Amino acid sequence: MTATRVAAGATEEPGAPALALAVPALLLVLAVAGLGISGYLTYVHWAHASVACGGLGSCDLVNNSEYAEFAGVPVALLGALTYLALIATALAWLWWRPPGLAWPVTVFWGLSLFGVLYSAYLTYVELFVLEAICVYCVVSAAIILTSFLISTGWIVREARVSDNGYQET
């Protein structure tokens, strides 16, 4: 049984098939970049090494603070796990290419929402508690925010296109 789109009186938008591939592919690229950043920060945290910040910010202060762990787990590892889940979901979205608001789309959106909220909290901690910035953390926050905005845009687009016109076949 698969979900198919019922035309609901509207025709498919020009360029829709290309967009249906480009959006999850872009989200996949963003998630891979985020995984690279969080993977690096996880390694540095566990290796007790210095973060290569290039003089931009106070990465070591942030990465070694009491806020760099949650229940004994490095926050960077939680980020890496989130990005791995986003990668898996984006790959499922690309492979399956479901019409409308199927599970890969909504799961990706939910994961990215979680990431945005947690990144906002961590950015608050950086700015107002630690009074230090980690450039890698800021870039990761920008990546997850961009992923959230793109997936939100896709959900809004699909909701408008489908007009909730799905049937089980």
Image (cartoon, rainbow, N blue to C red):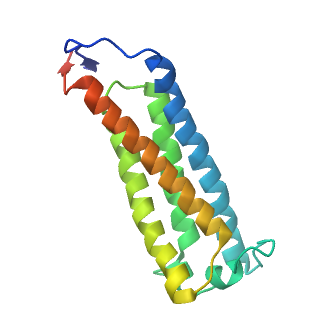
Left or right of 105? Residue 94 is right
Which residue sits at x=38%, y=56%?
Answer: 113
- Does residue 80 appear in this view? no
Q: Nearer the viewer, residue 48 or 166?
A: 166
Q: Quadrant of the C terminus?
A: top left
Could you say where residue 65 lies in the image, as x and y percent from the top left?
A: 59, 86
Could you say where residue 140 lies in the image, as x and y percent from the top left?
A: 58, 60
Q: Nearer the viewer, residue 65 or 155?
A: 155
Could you say where residue 19 lies in the image, as x and y percent from the top left?
A: 48, 25
Q: Quadrant of the N terminus?
A: top left
Which residue sits at x=70%, y=77%?
Answer: 57
Image quadrant where residue 56 sits: bottom right
Which residue sits at x=21%, y=26%?
Answer: 163
Q: Is residue 165 placed above or below 32 in the rendered structure?
A: above
Left or right of 27? Residue 14 is left
Q: How many marks?
A: 0
Left or right of 138? Residue 93 is left
- Does residue 35 appear in this view? yes
Q: Is residue 127 placed above or below 158 in the rendered structure?
A: below
Q: Is residue 73 placed above or below 92 in the rendered structure?
A: below
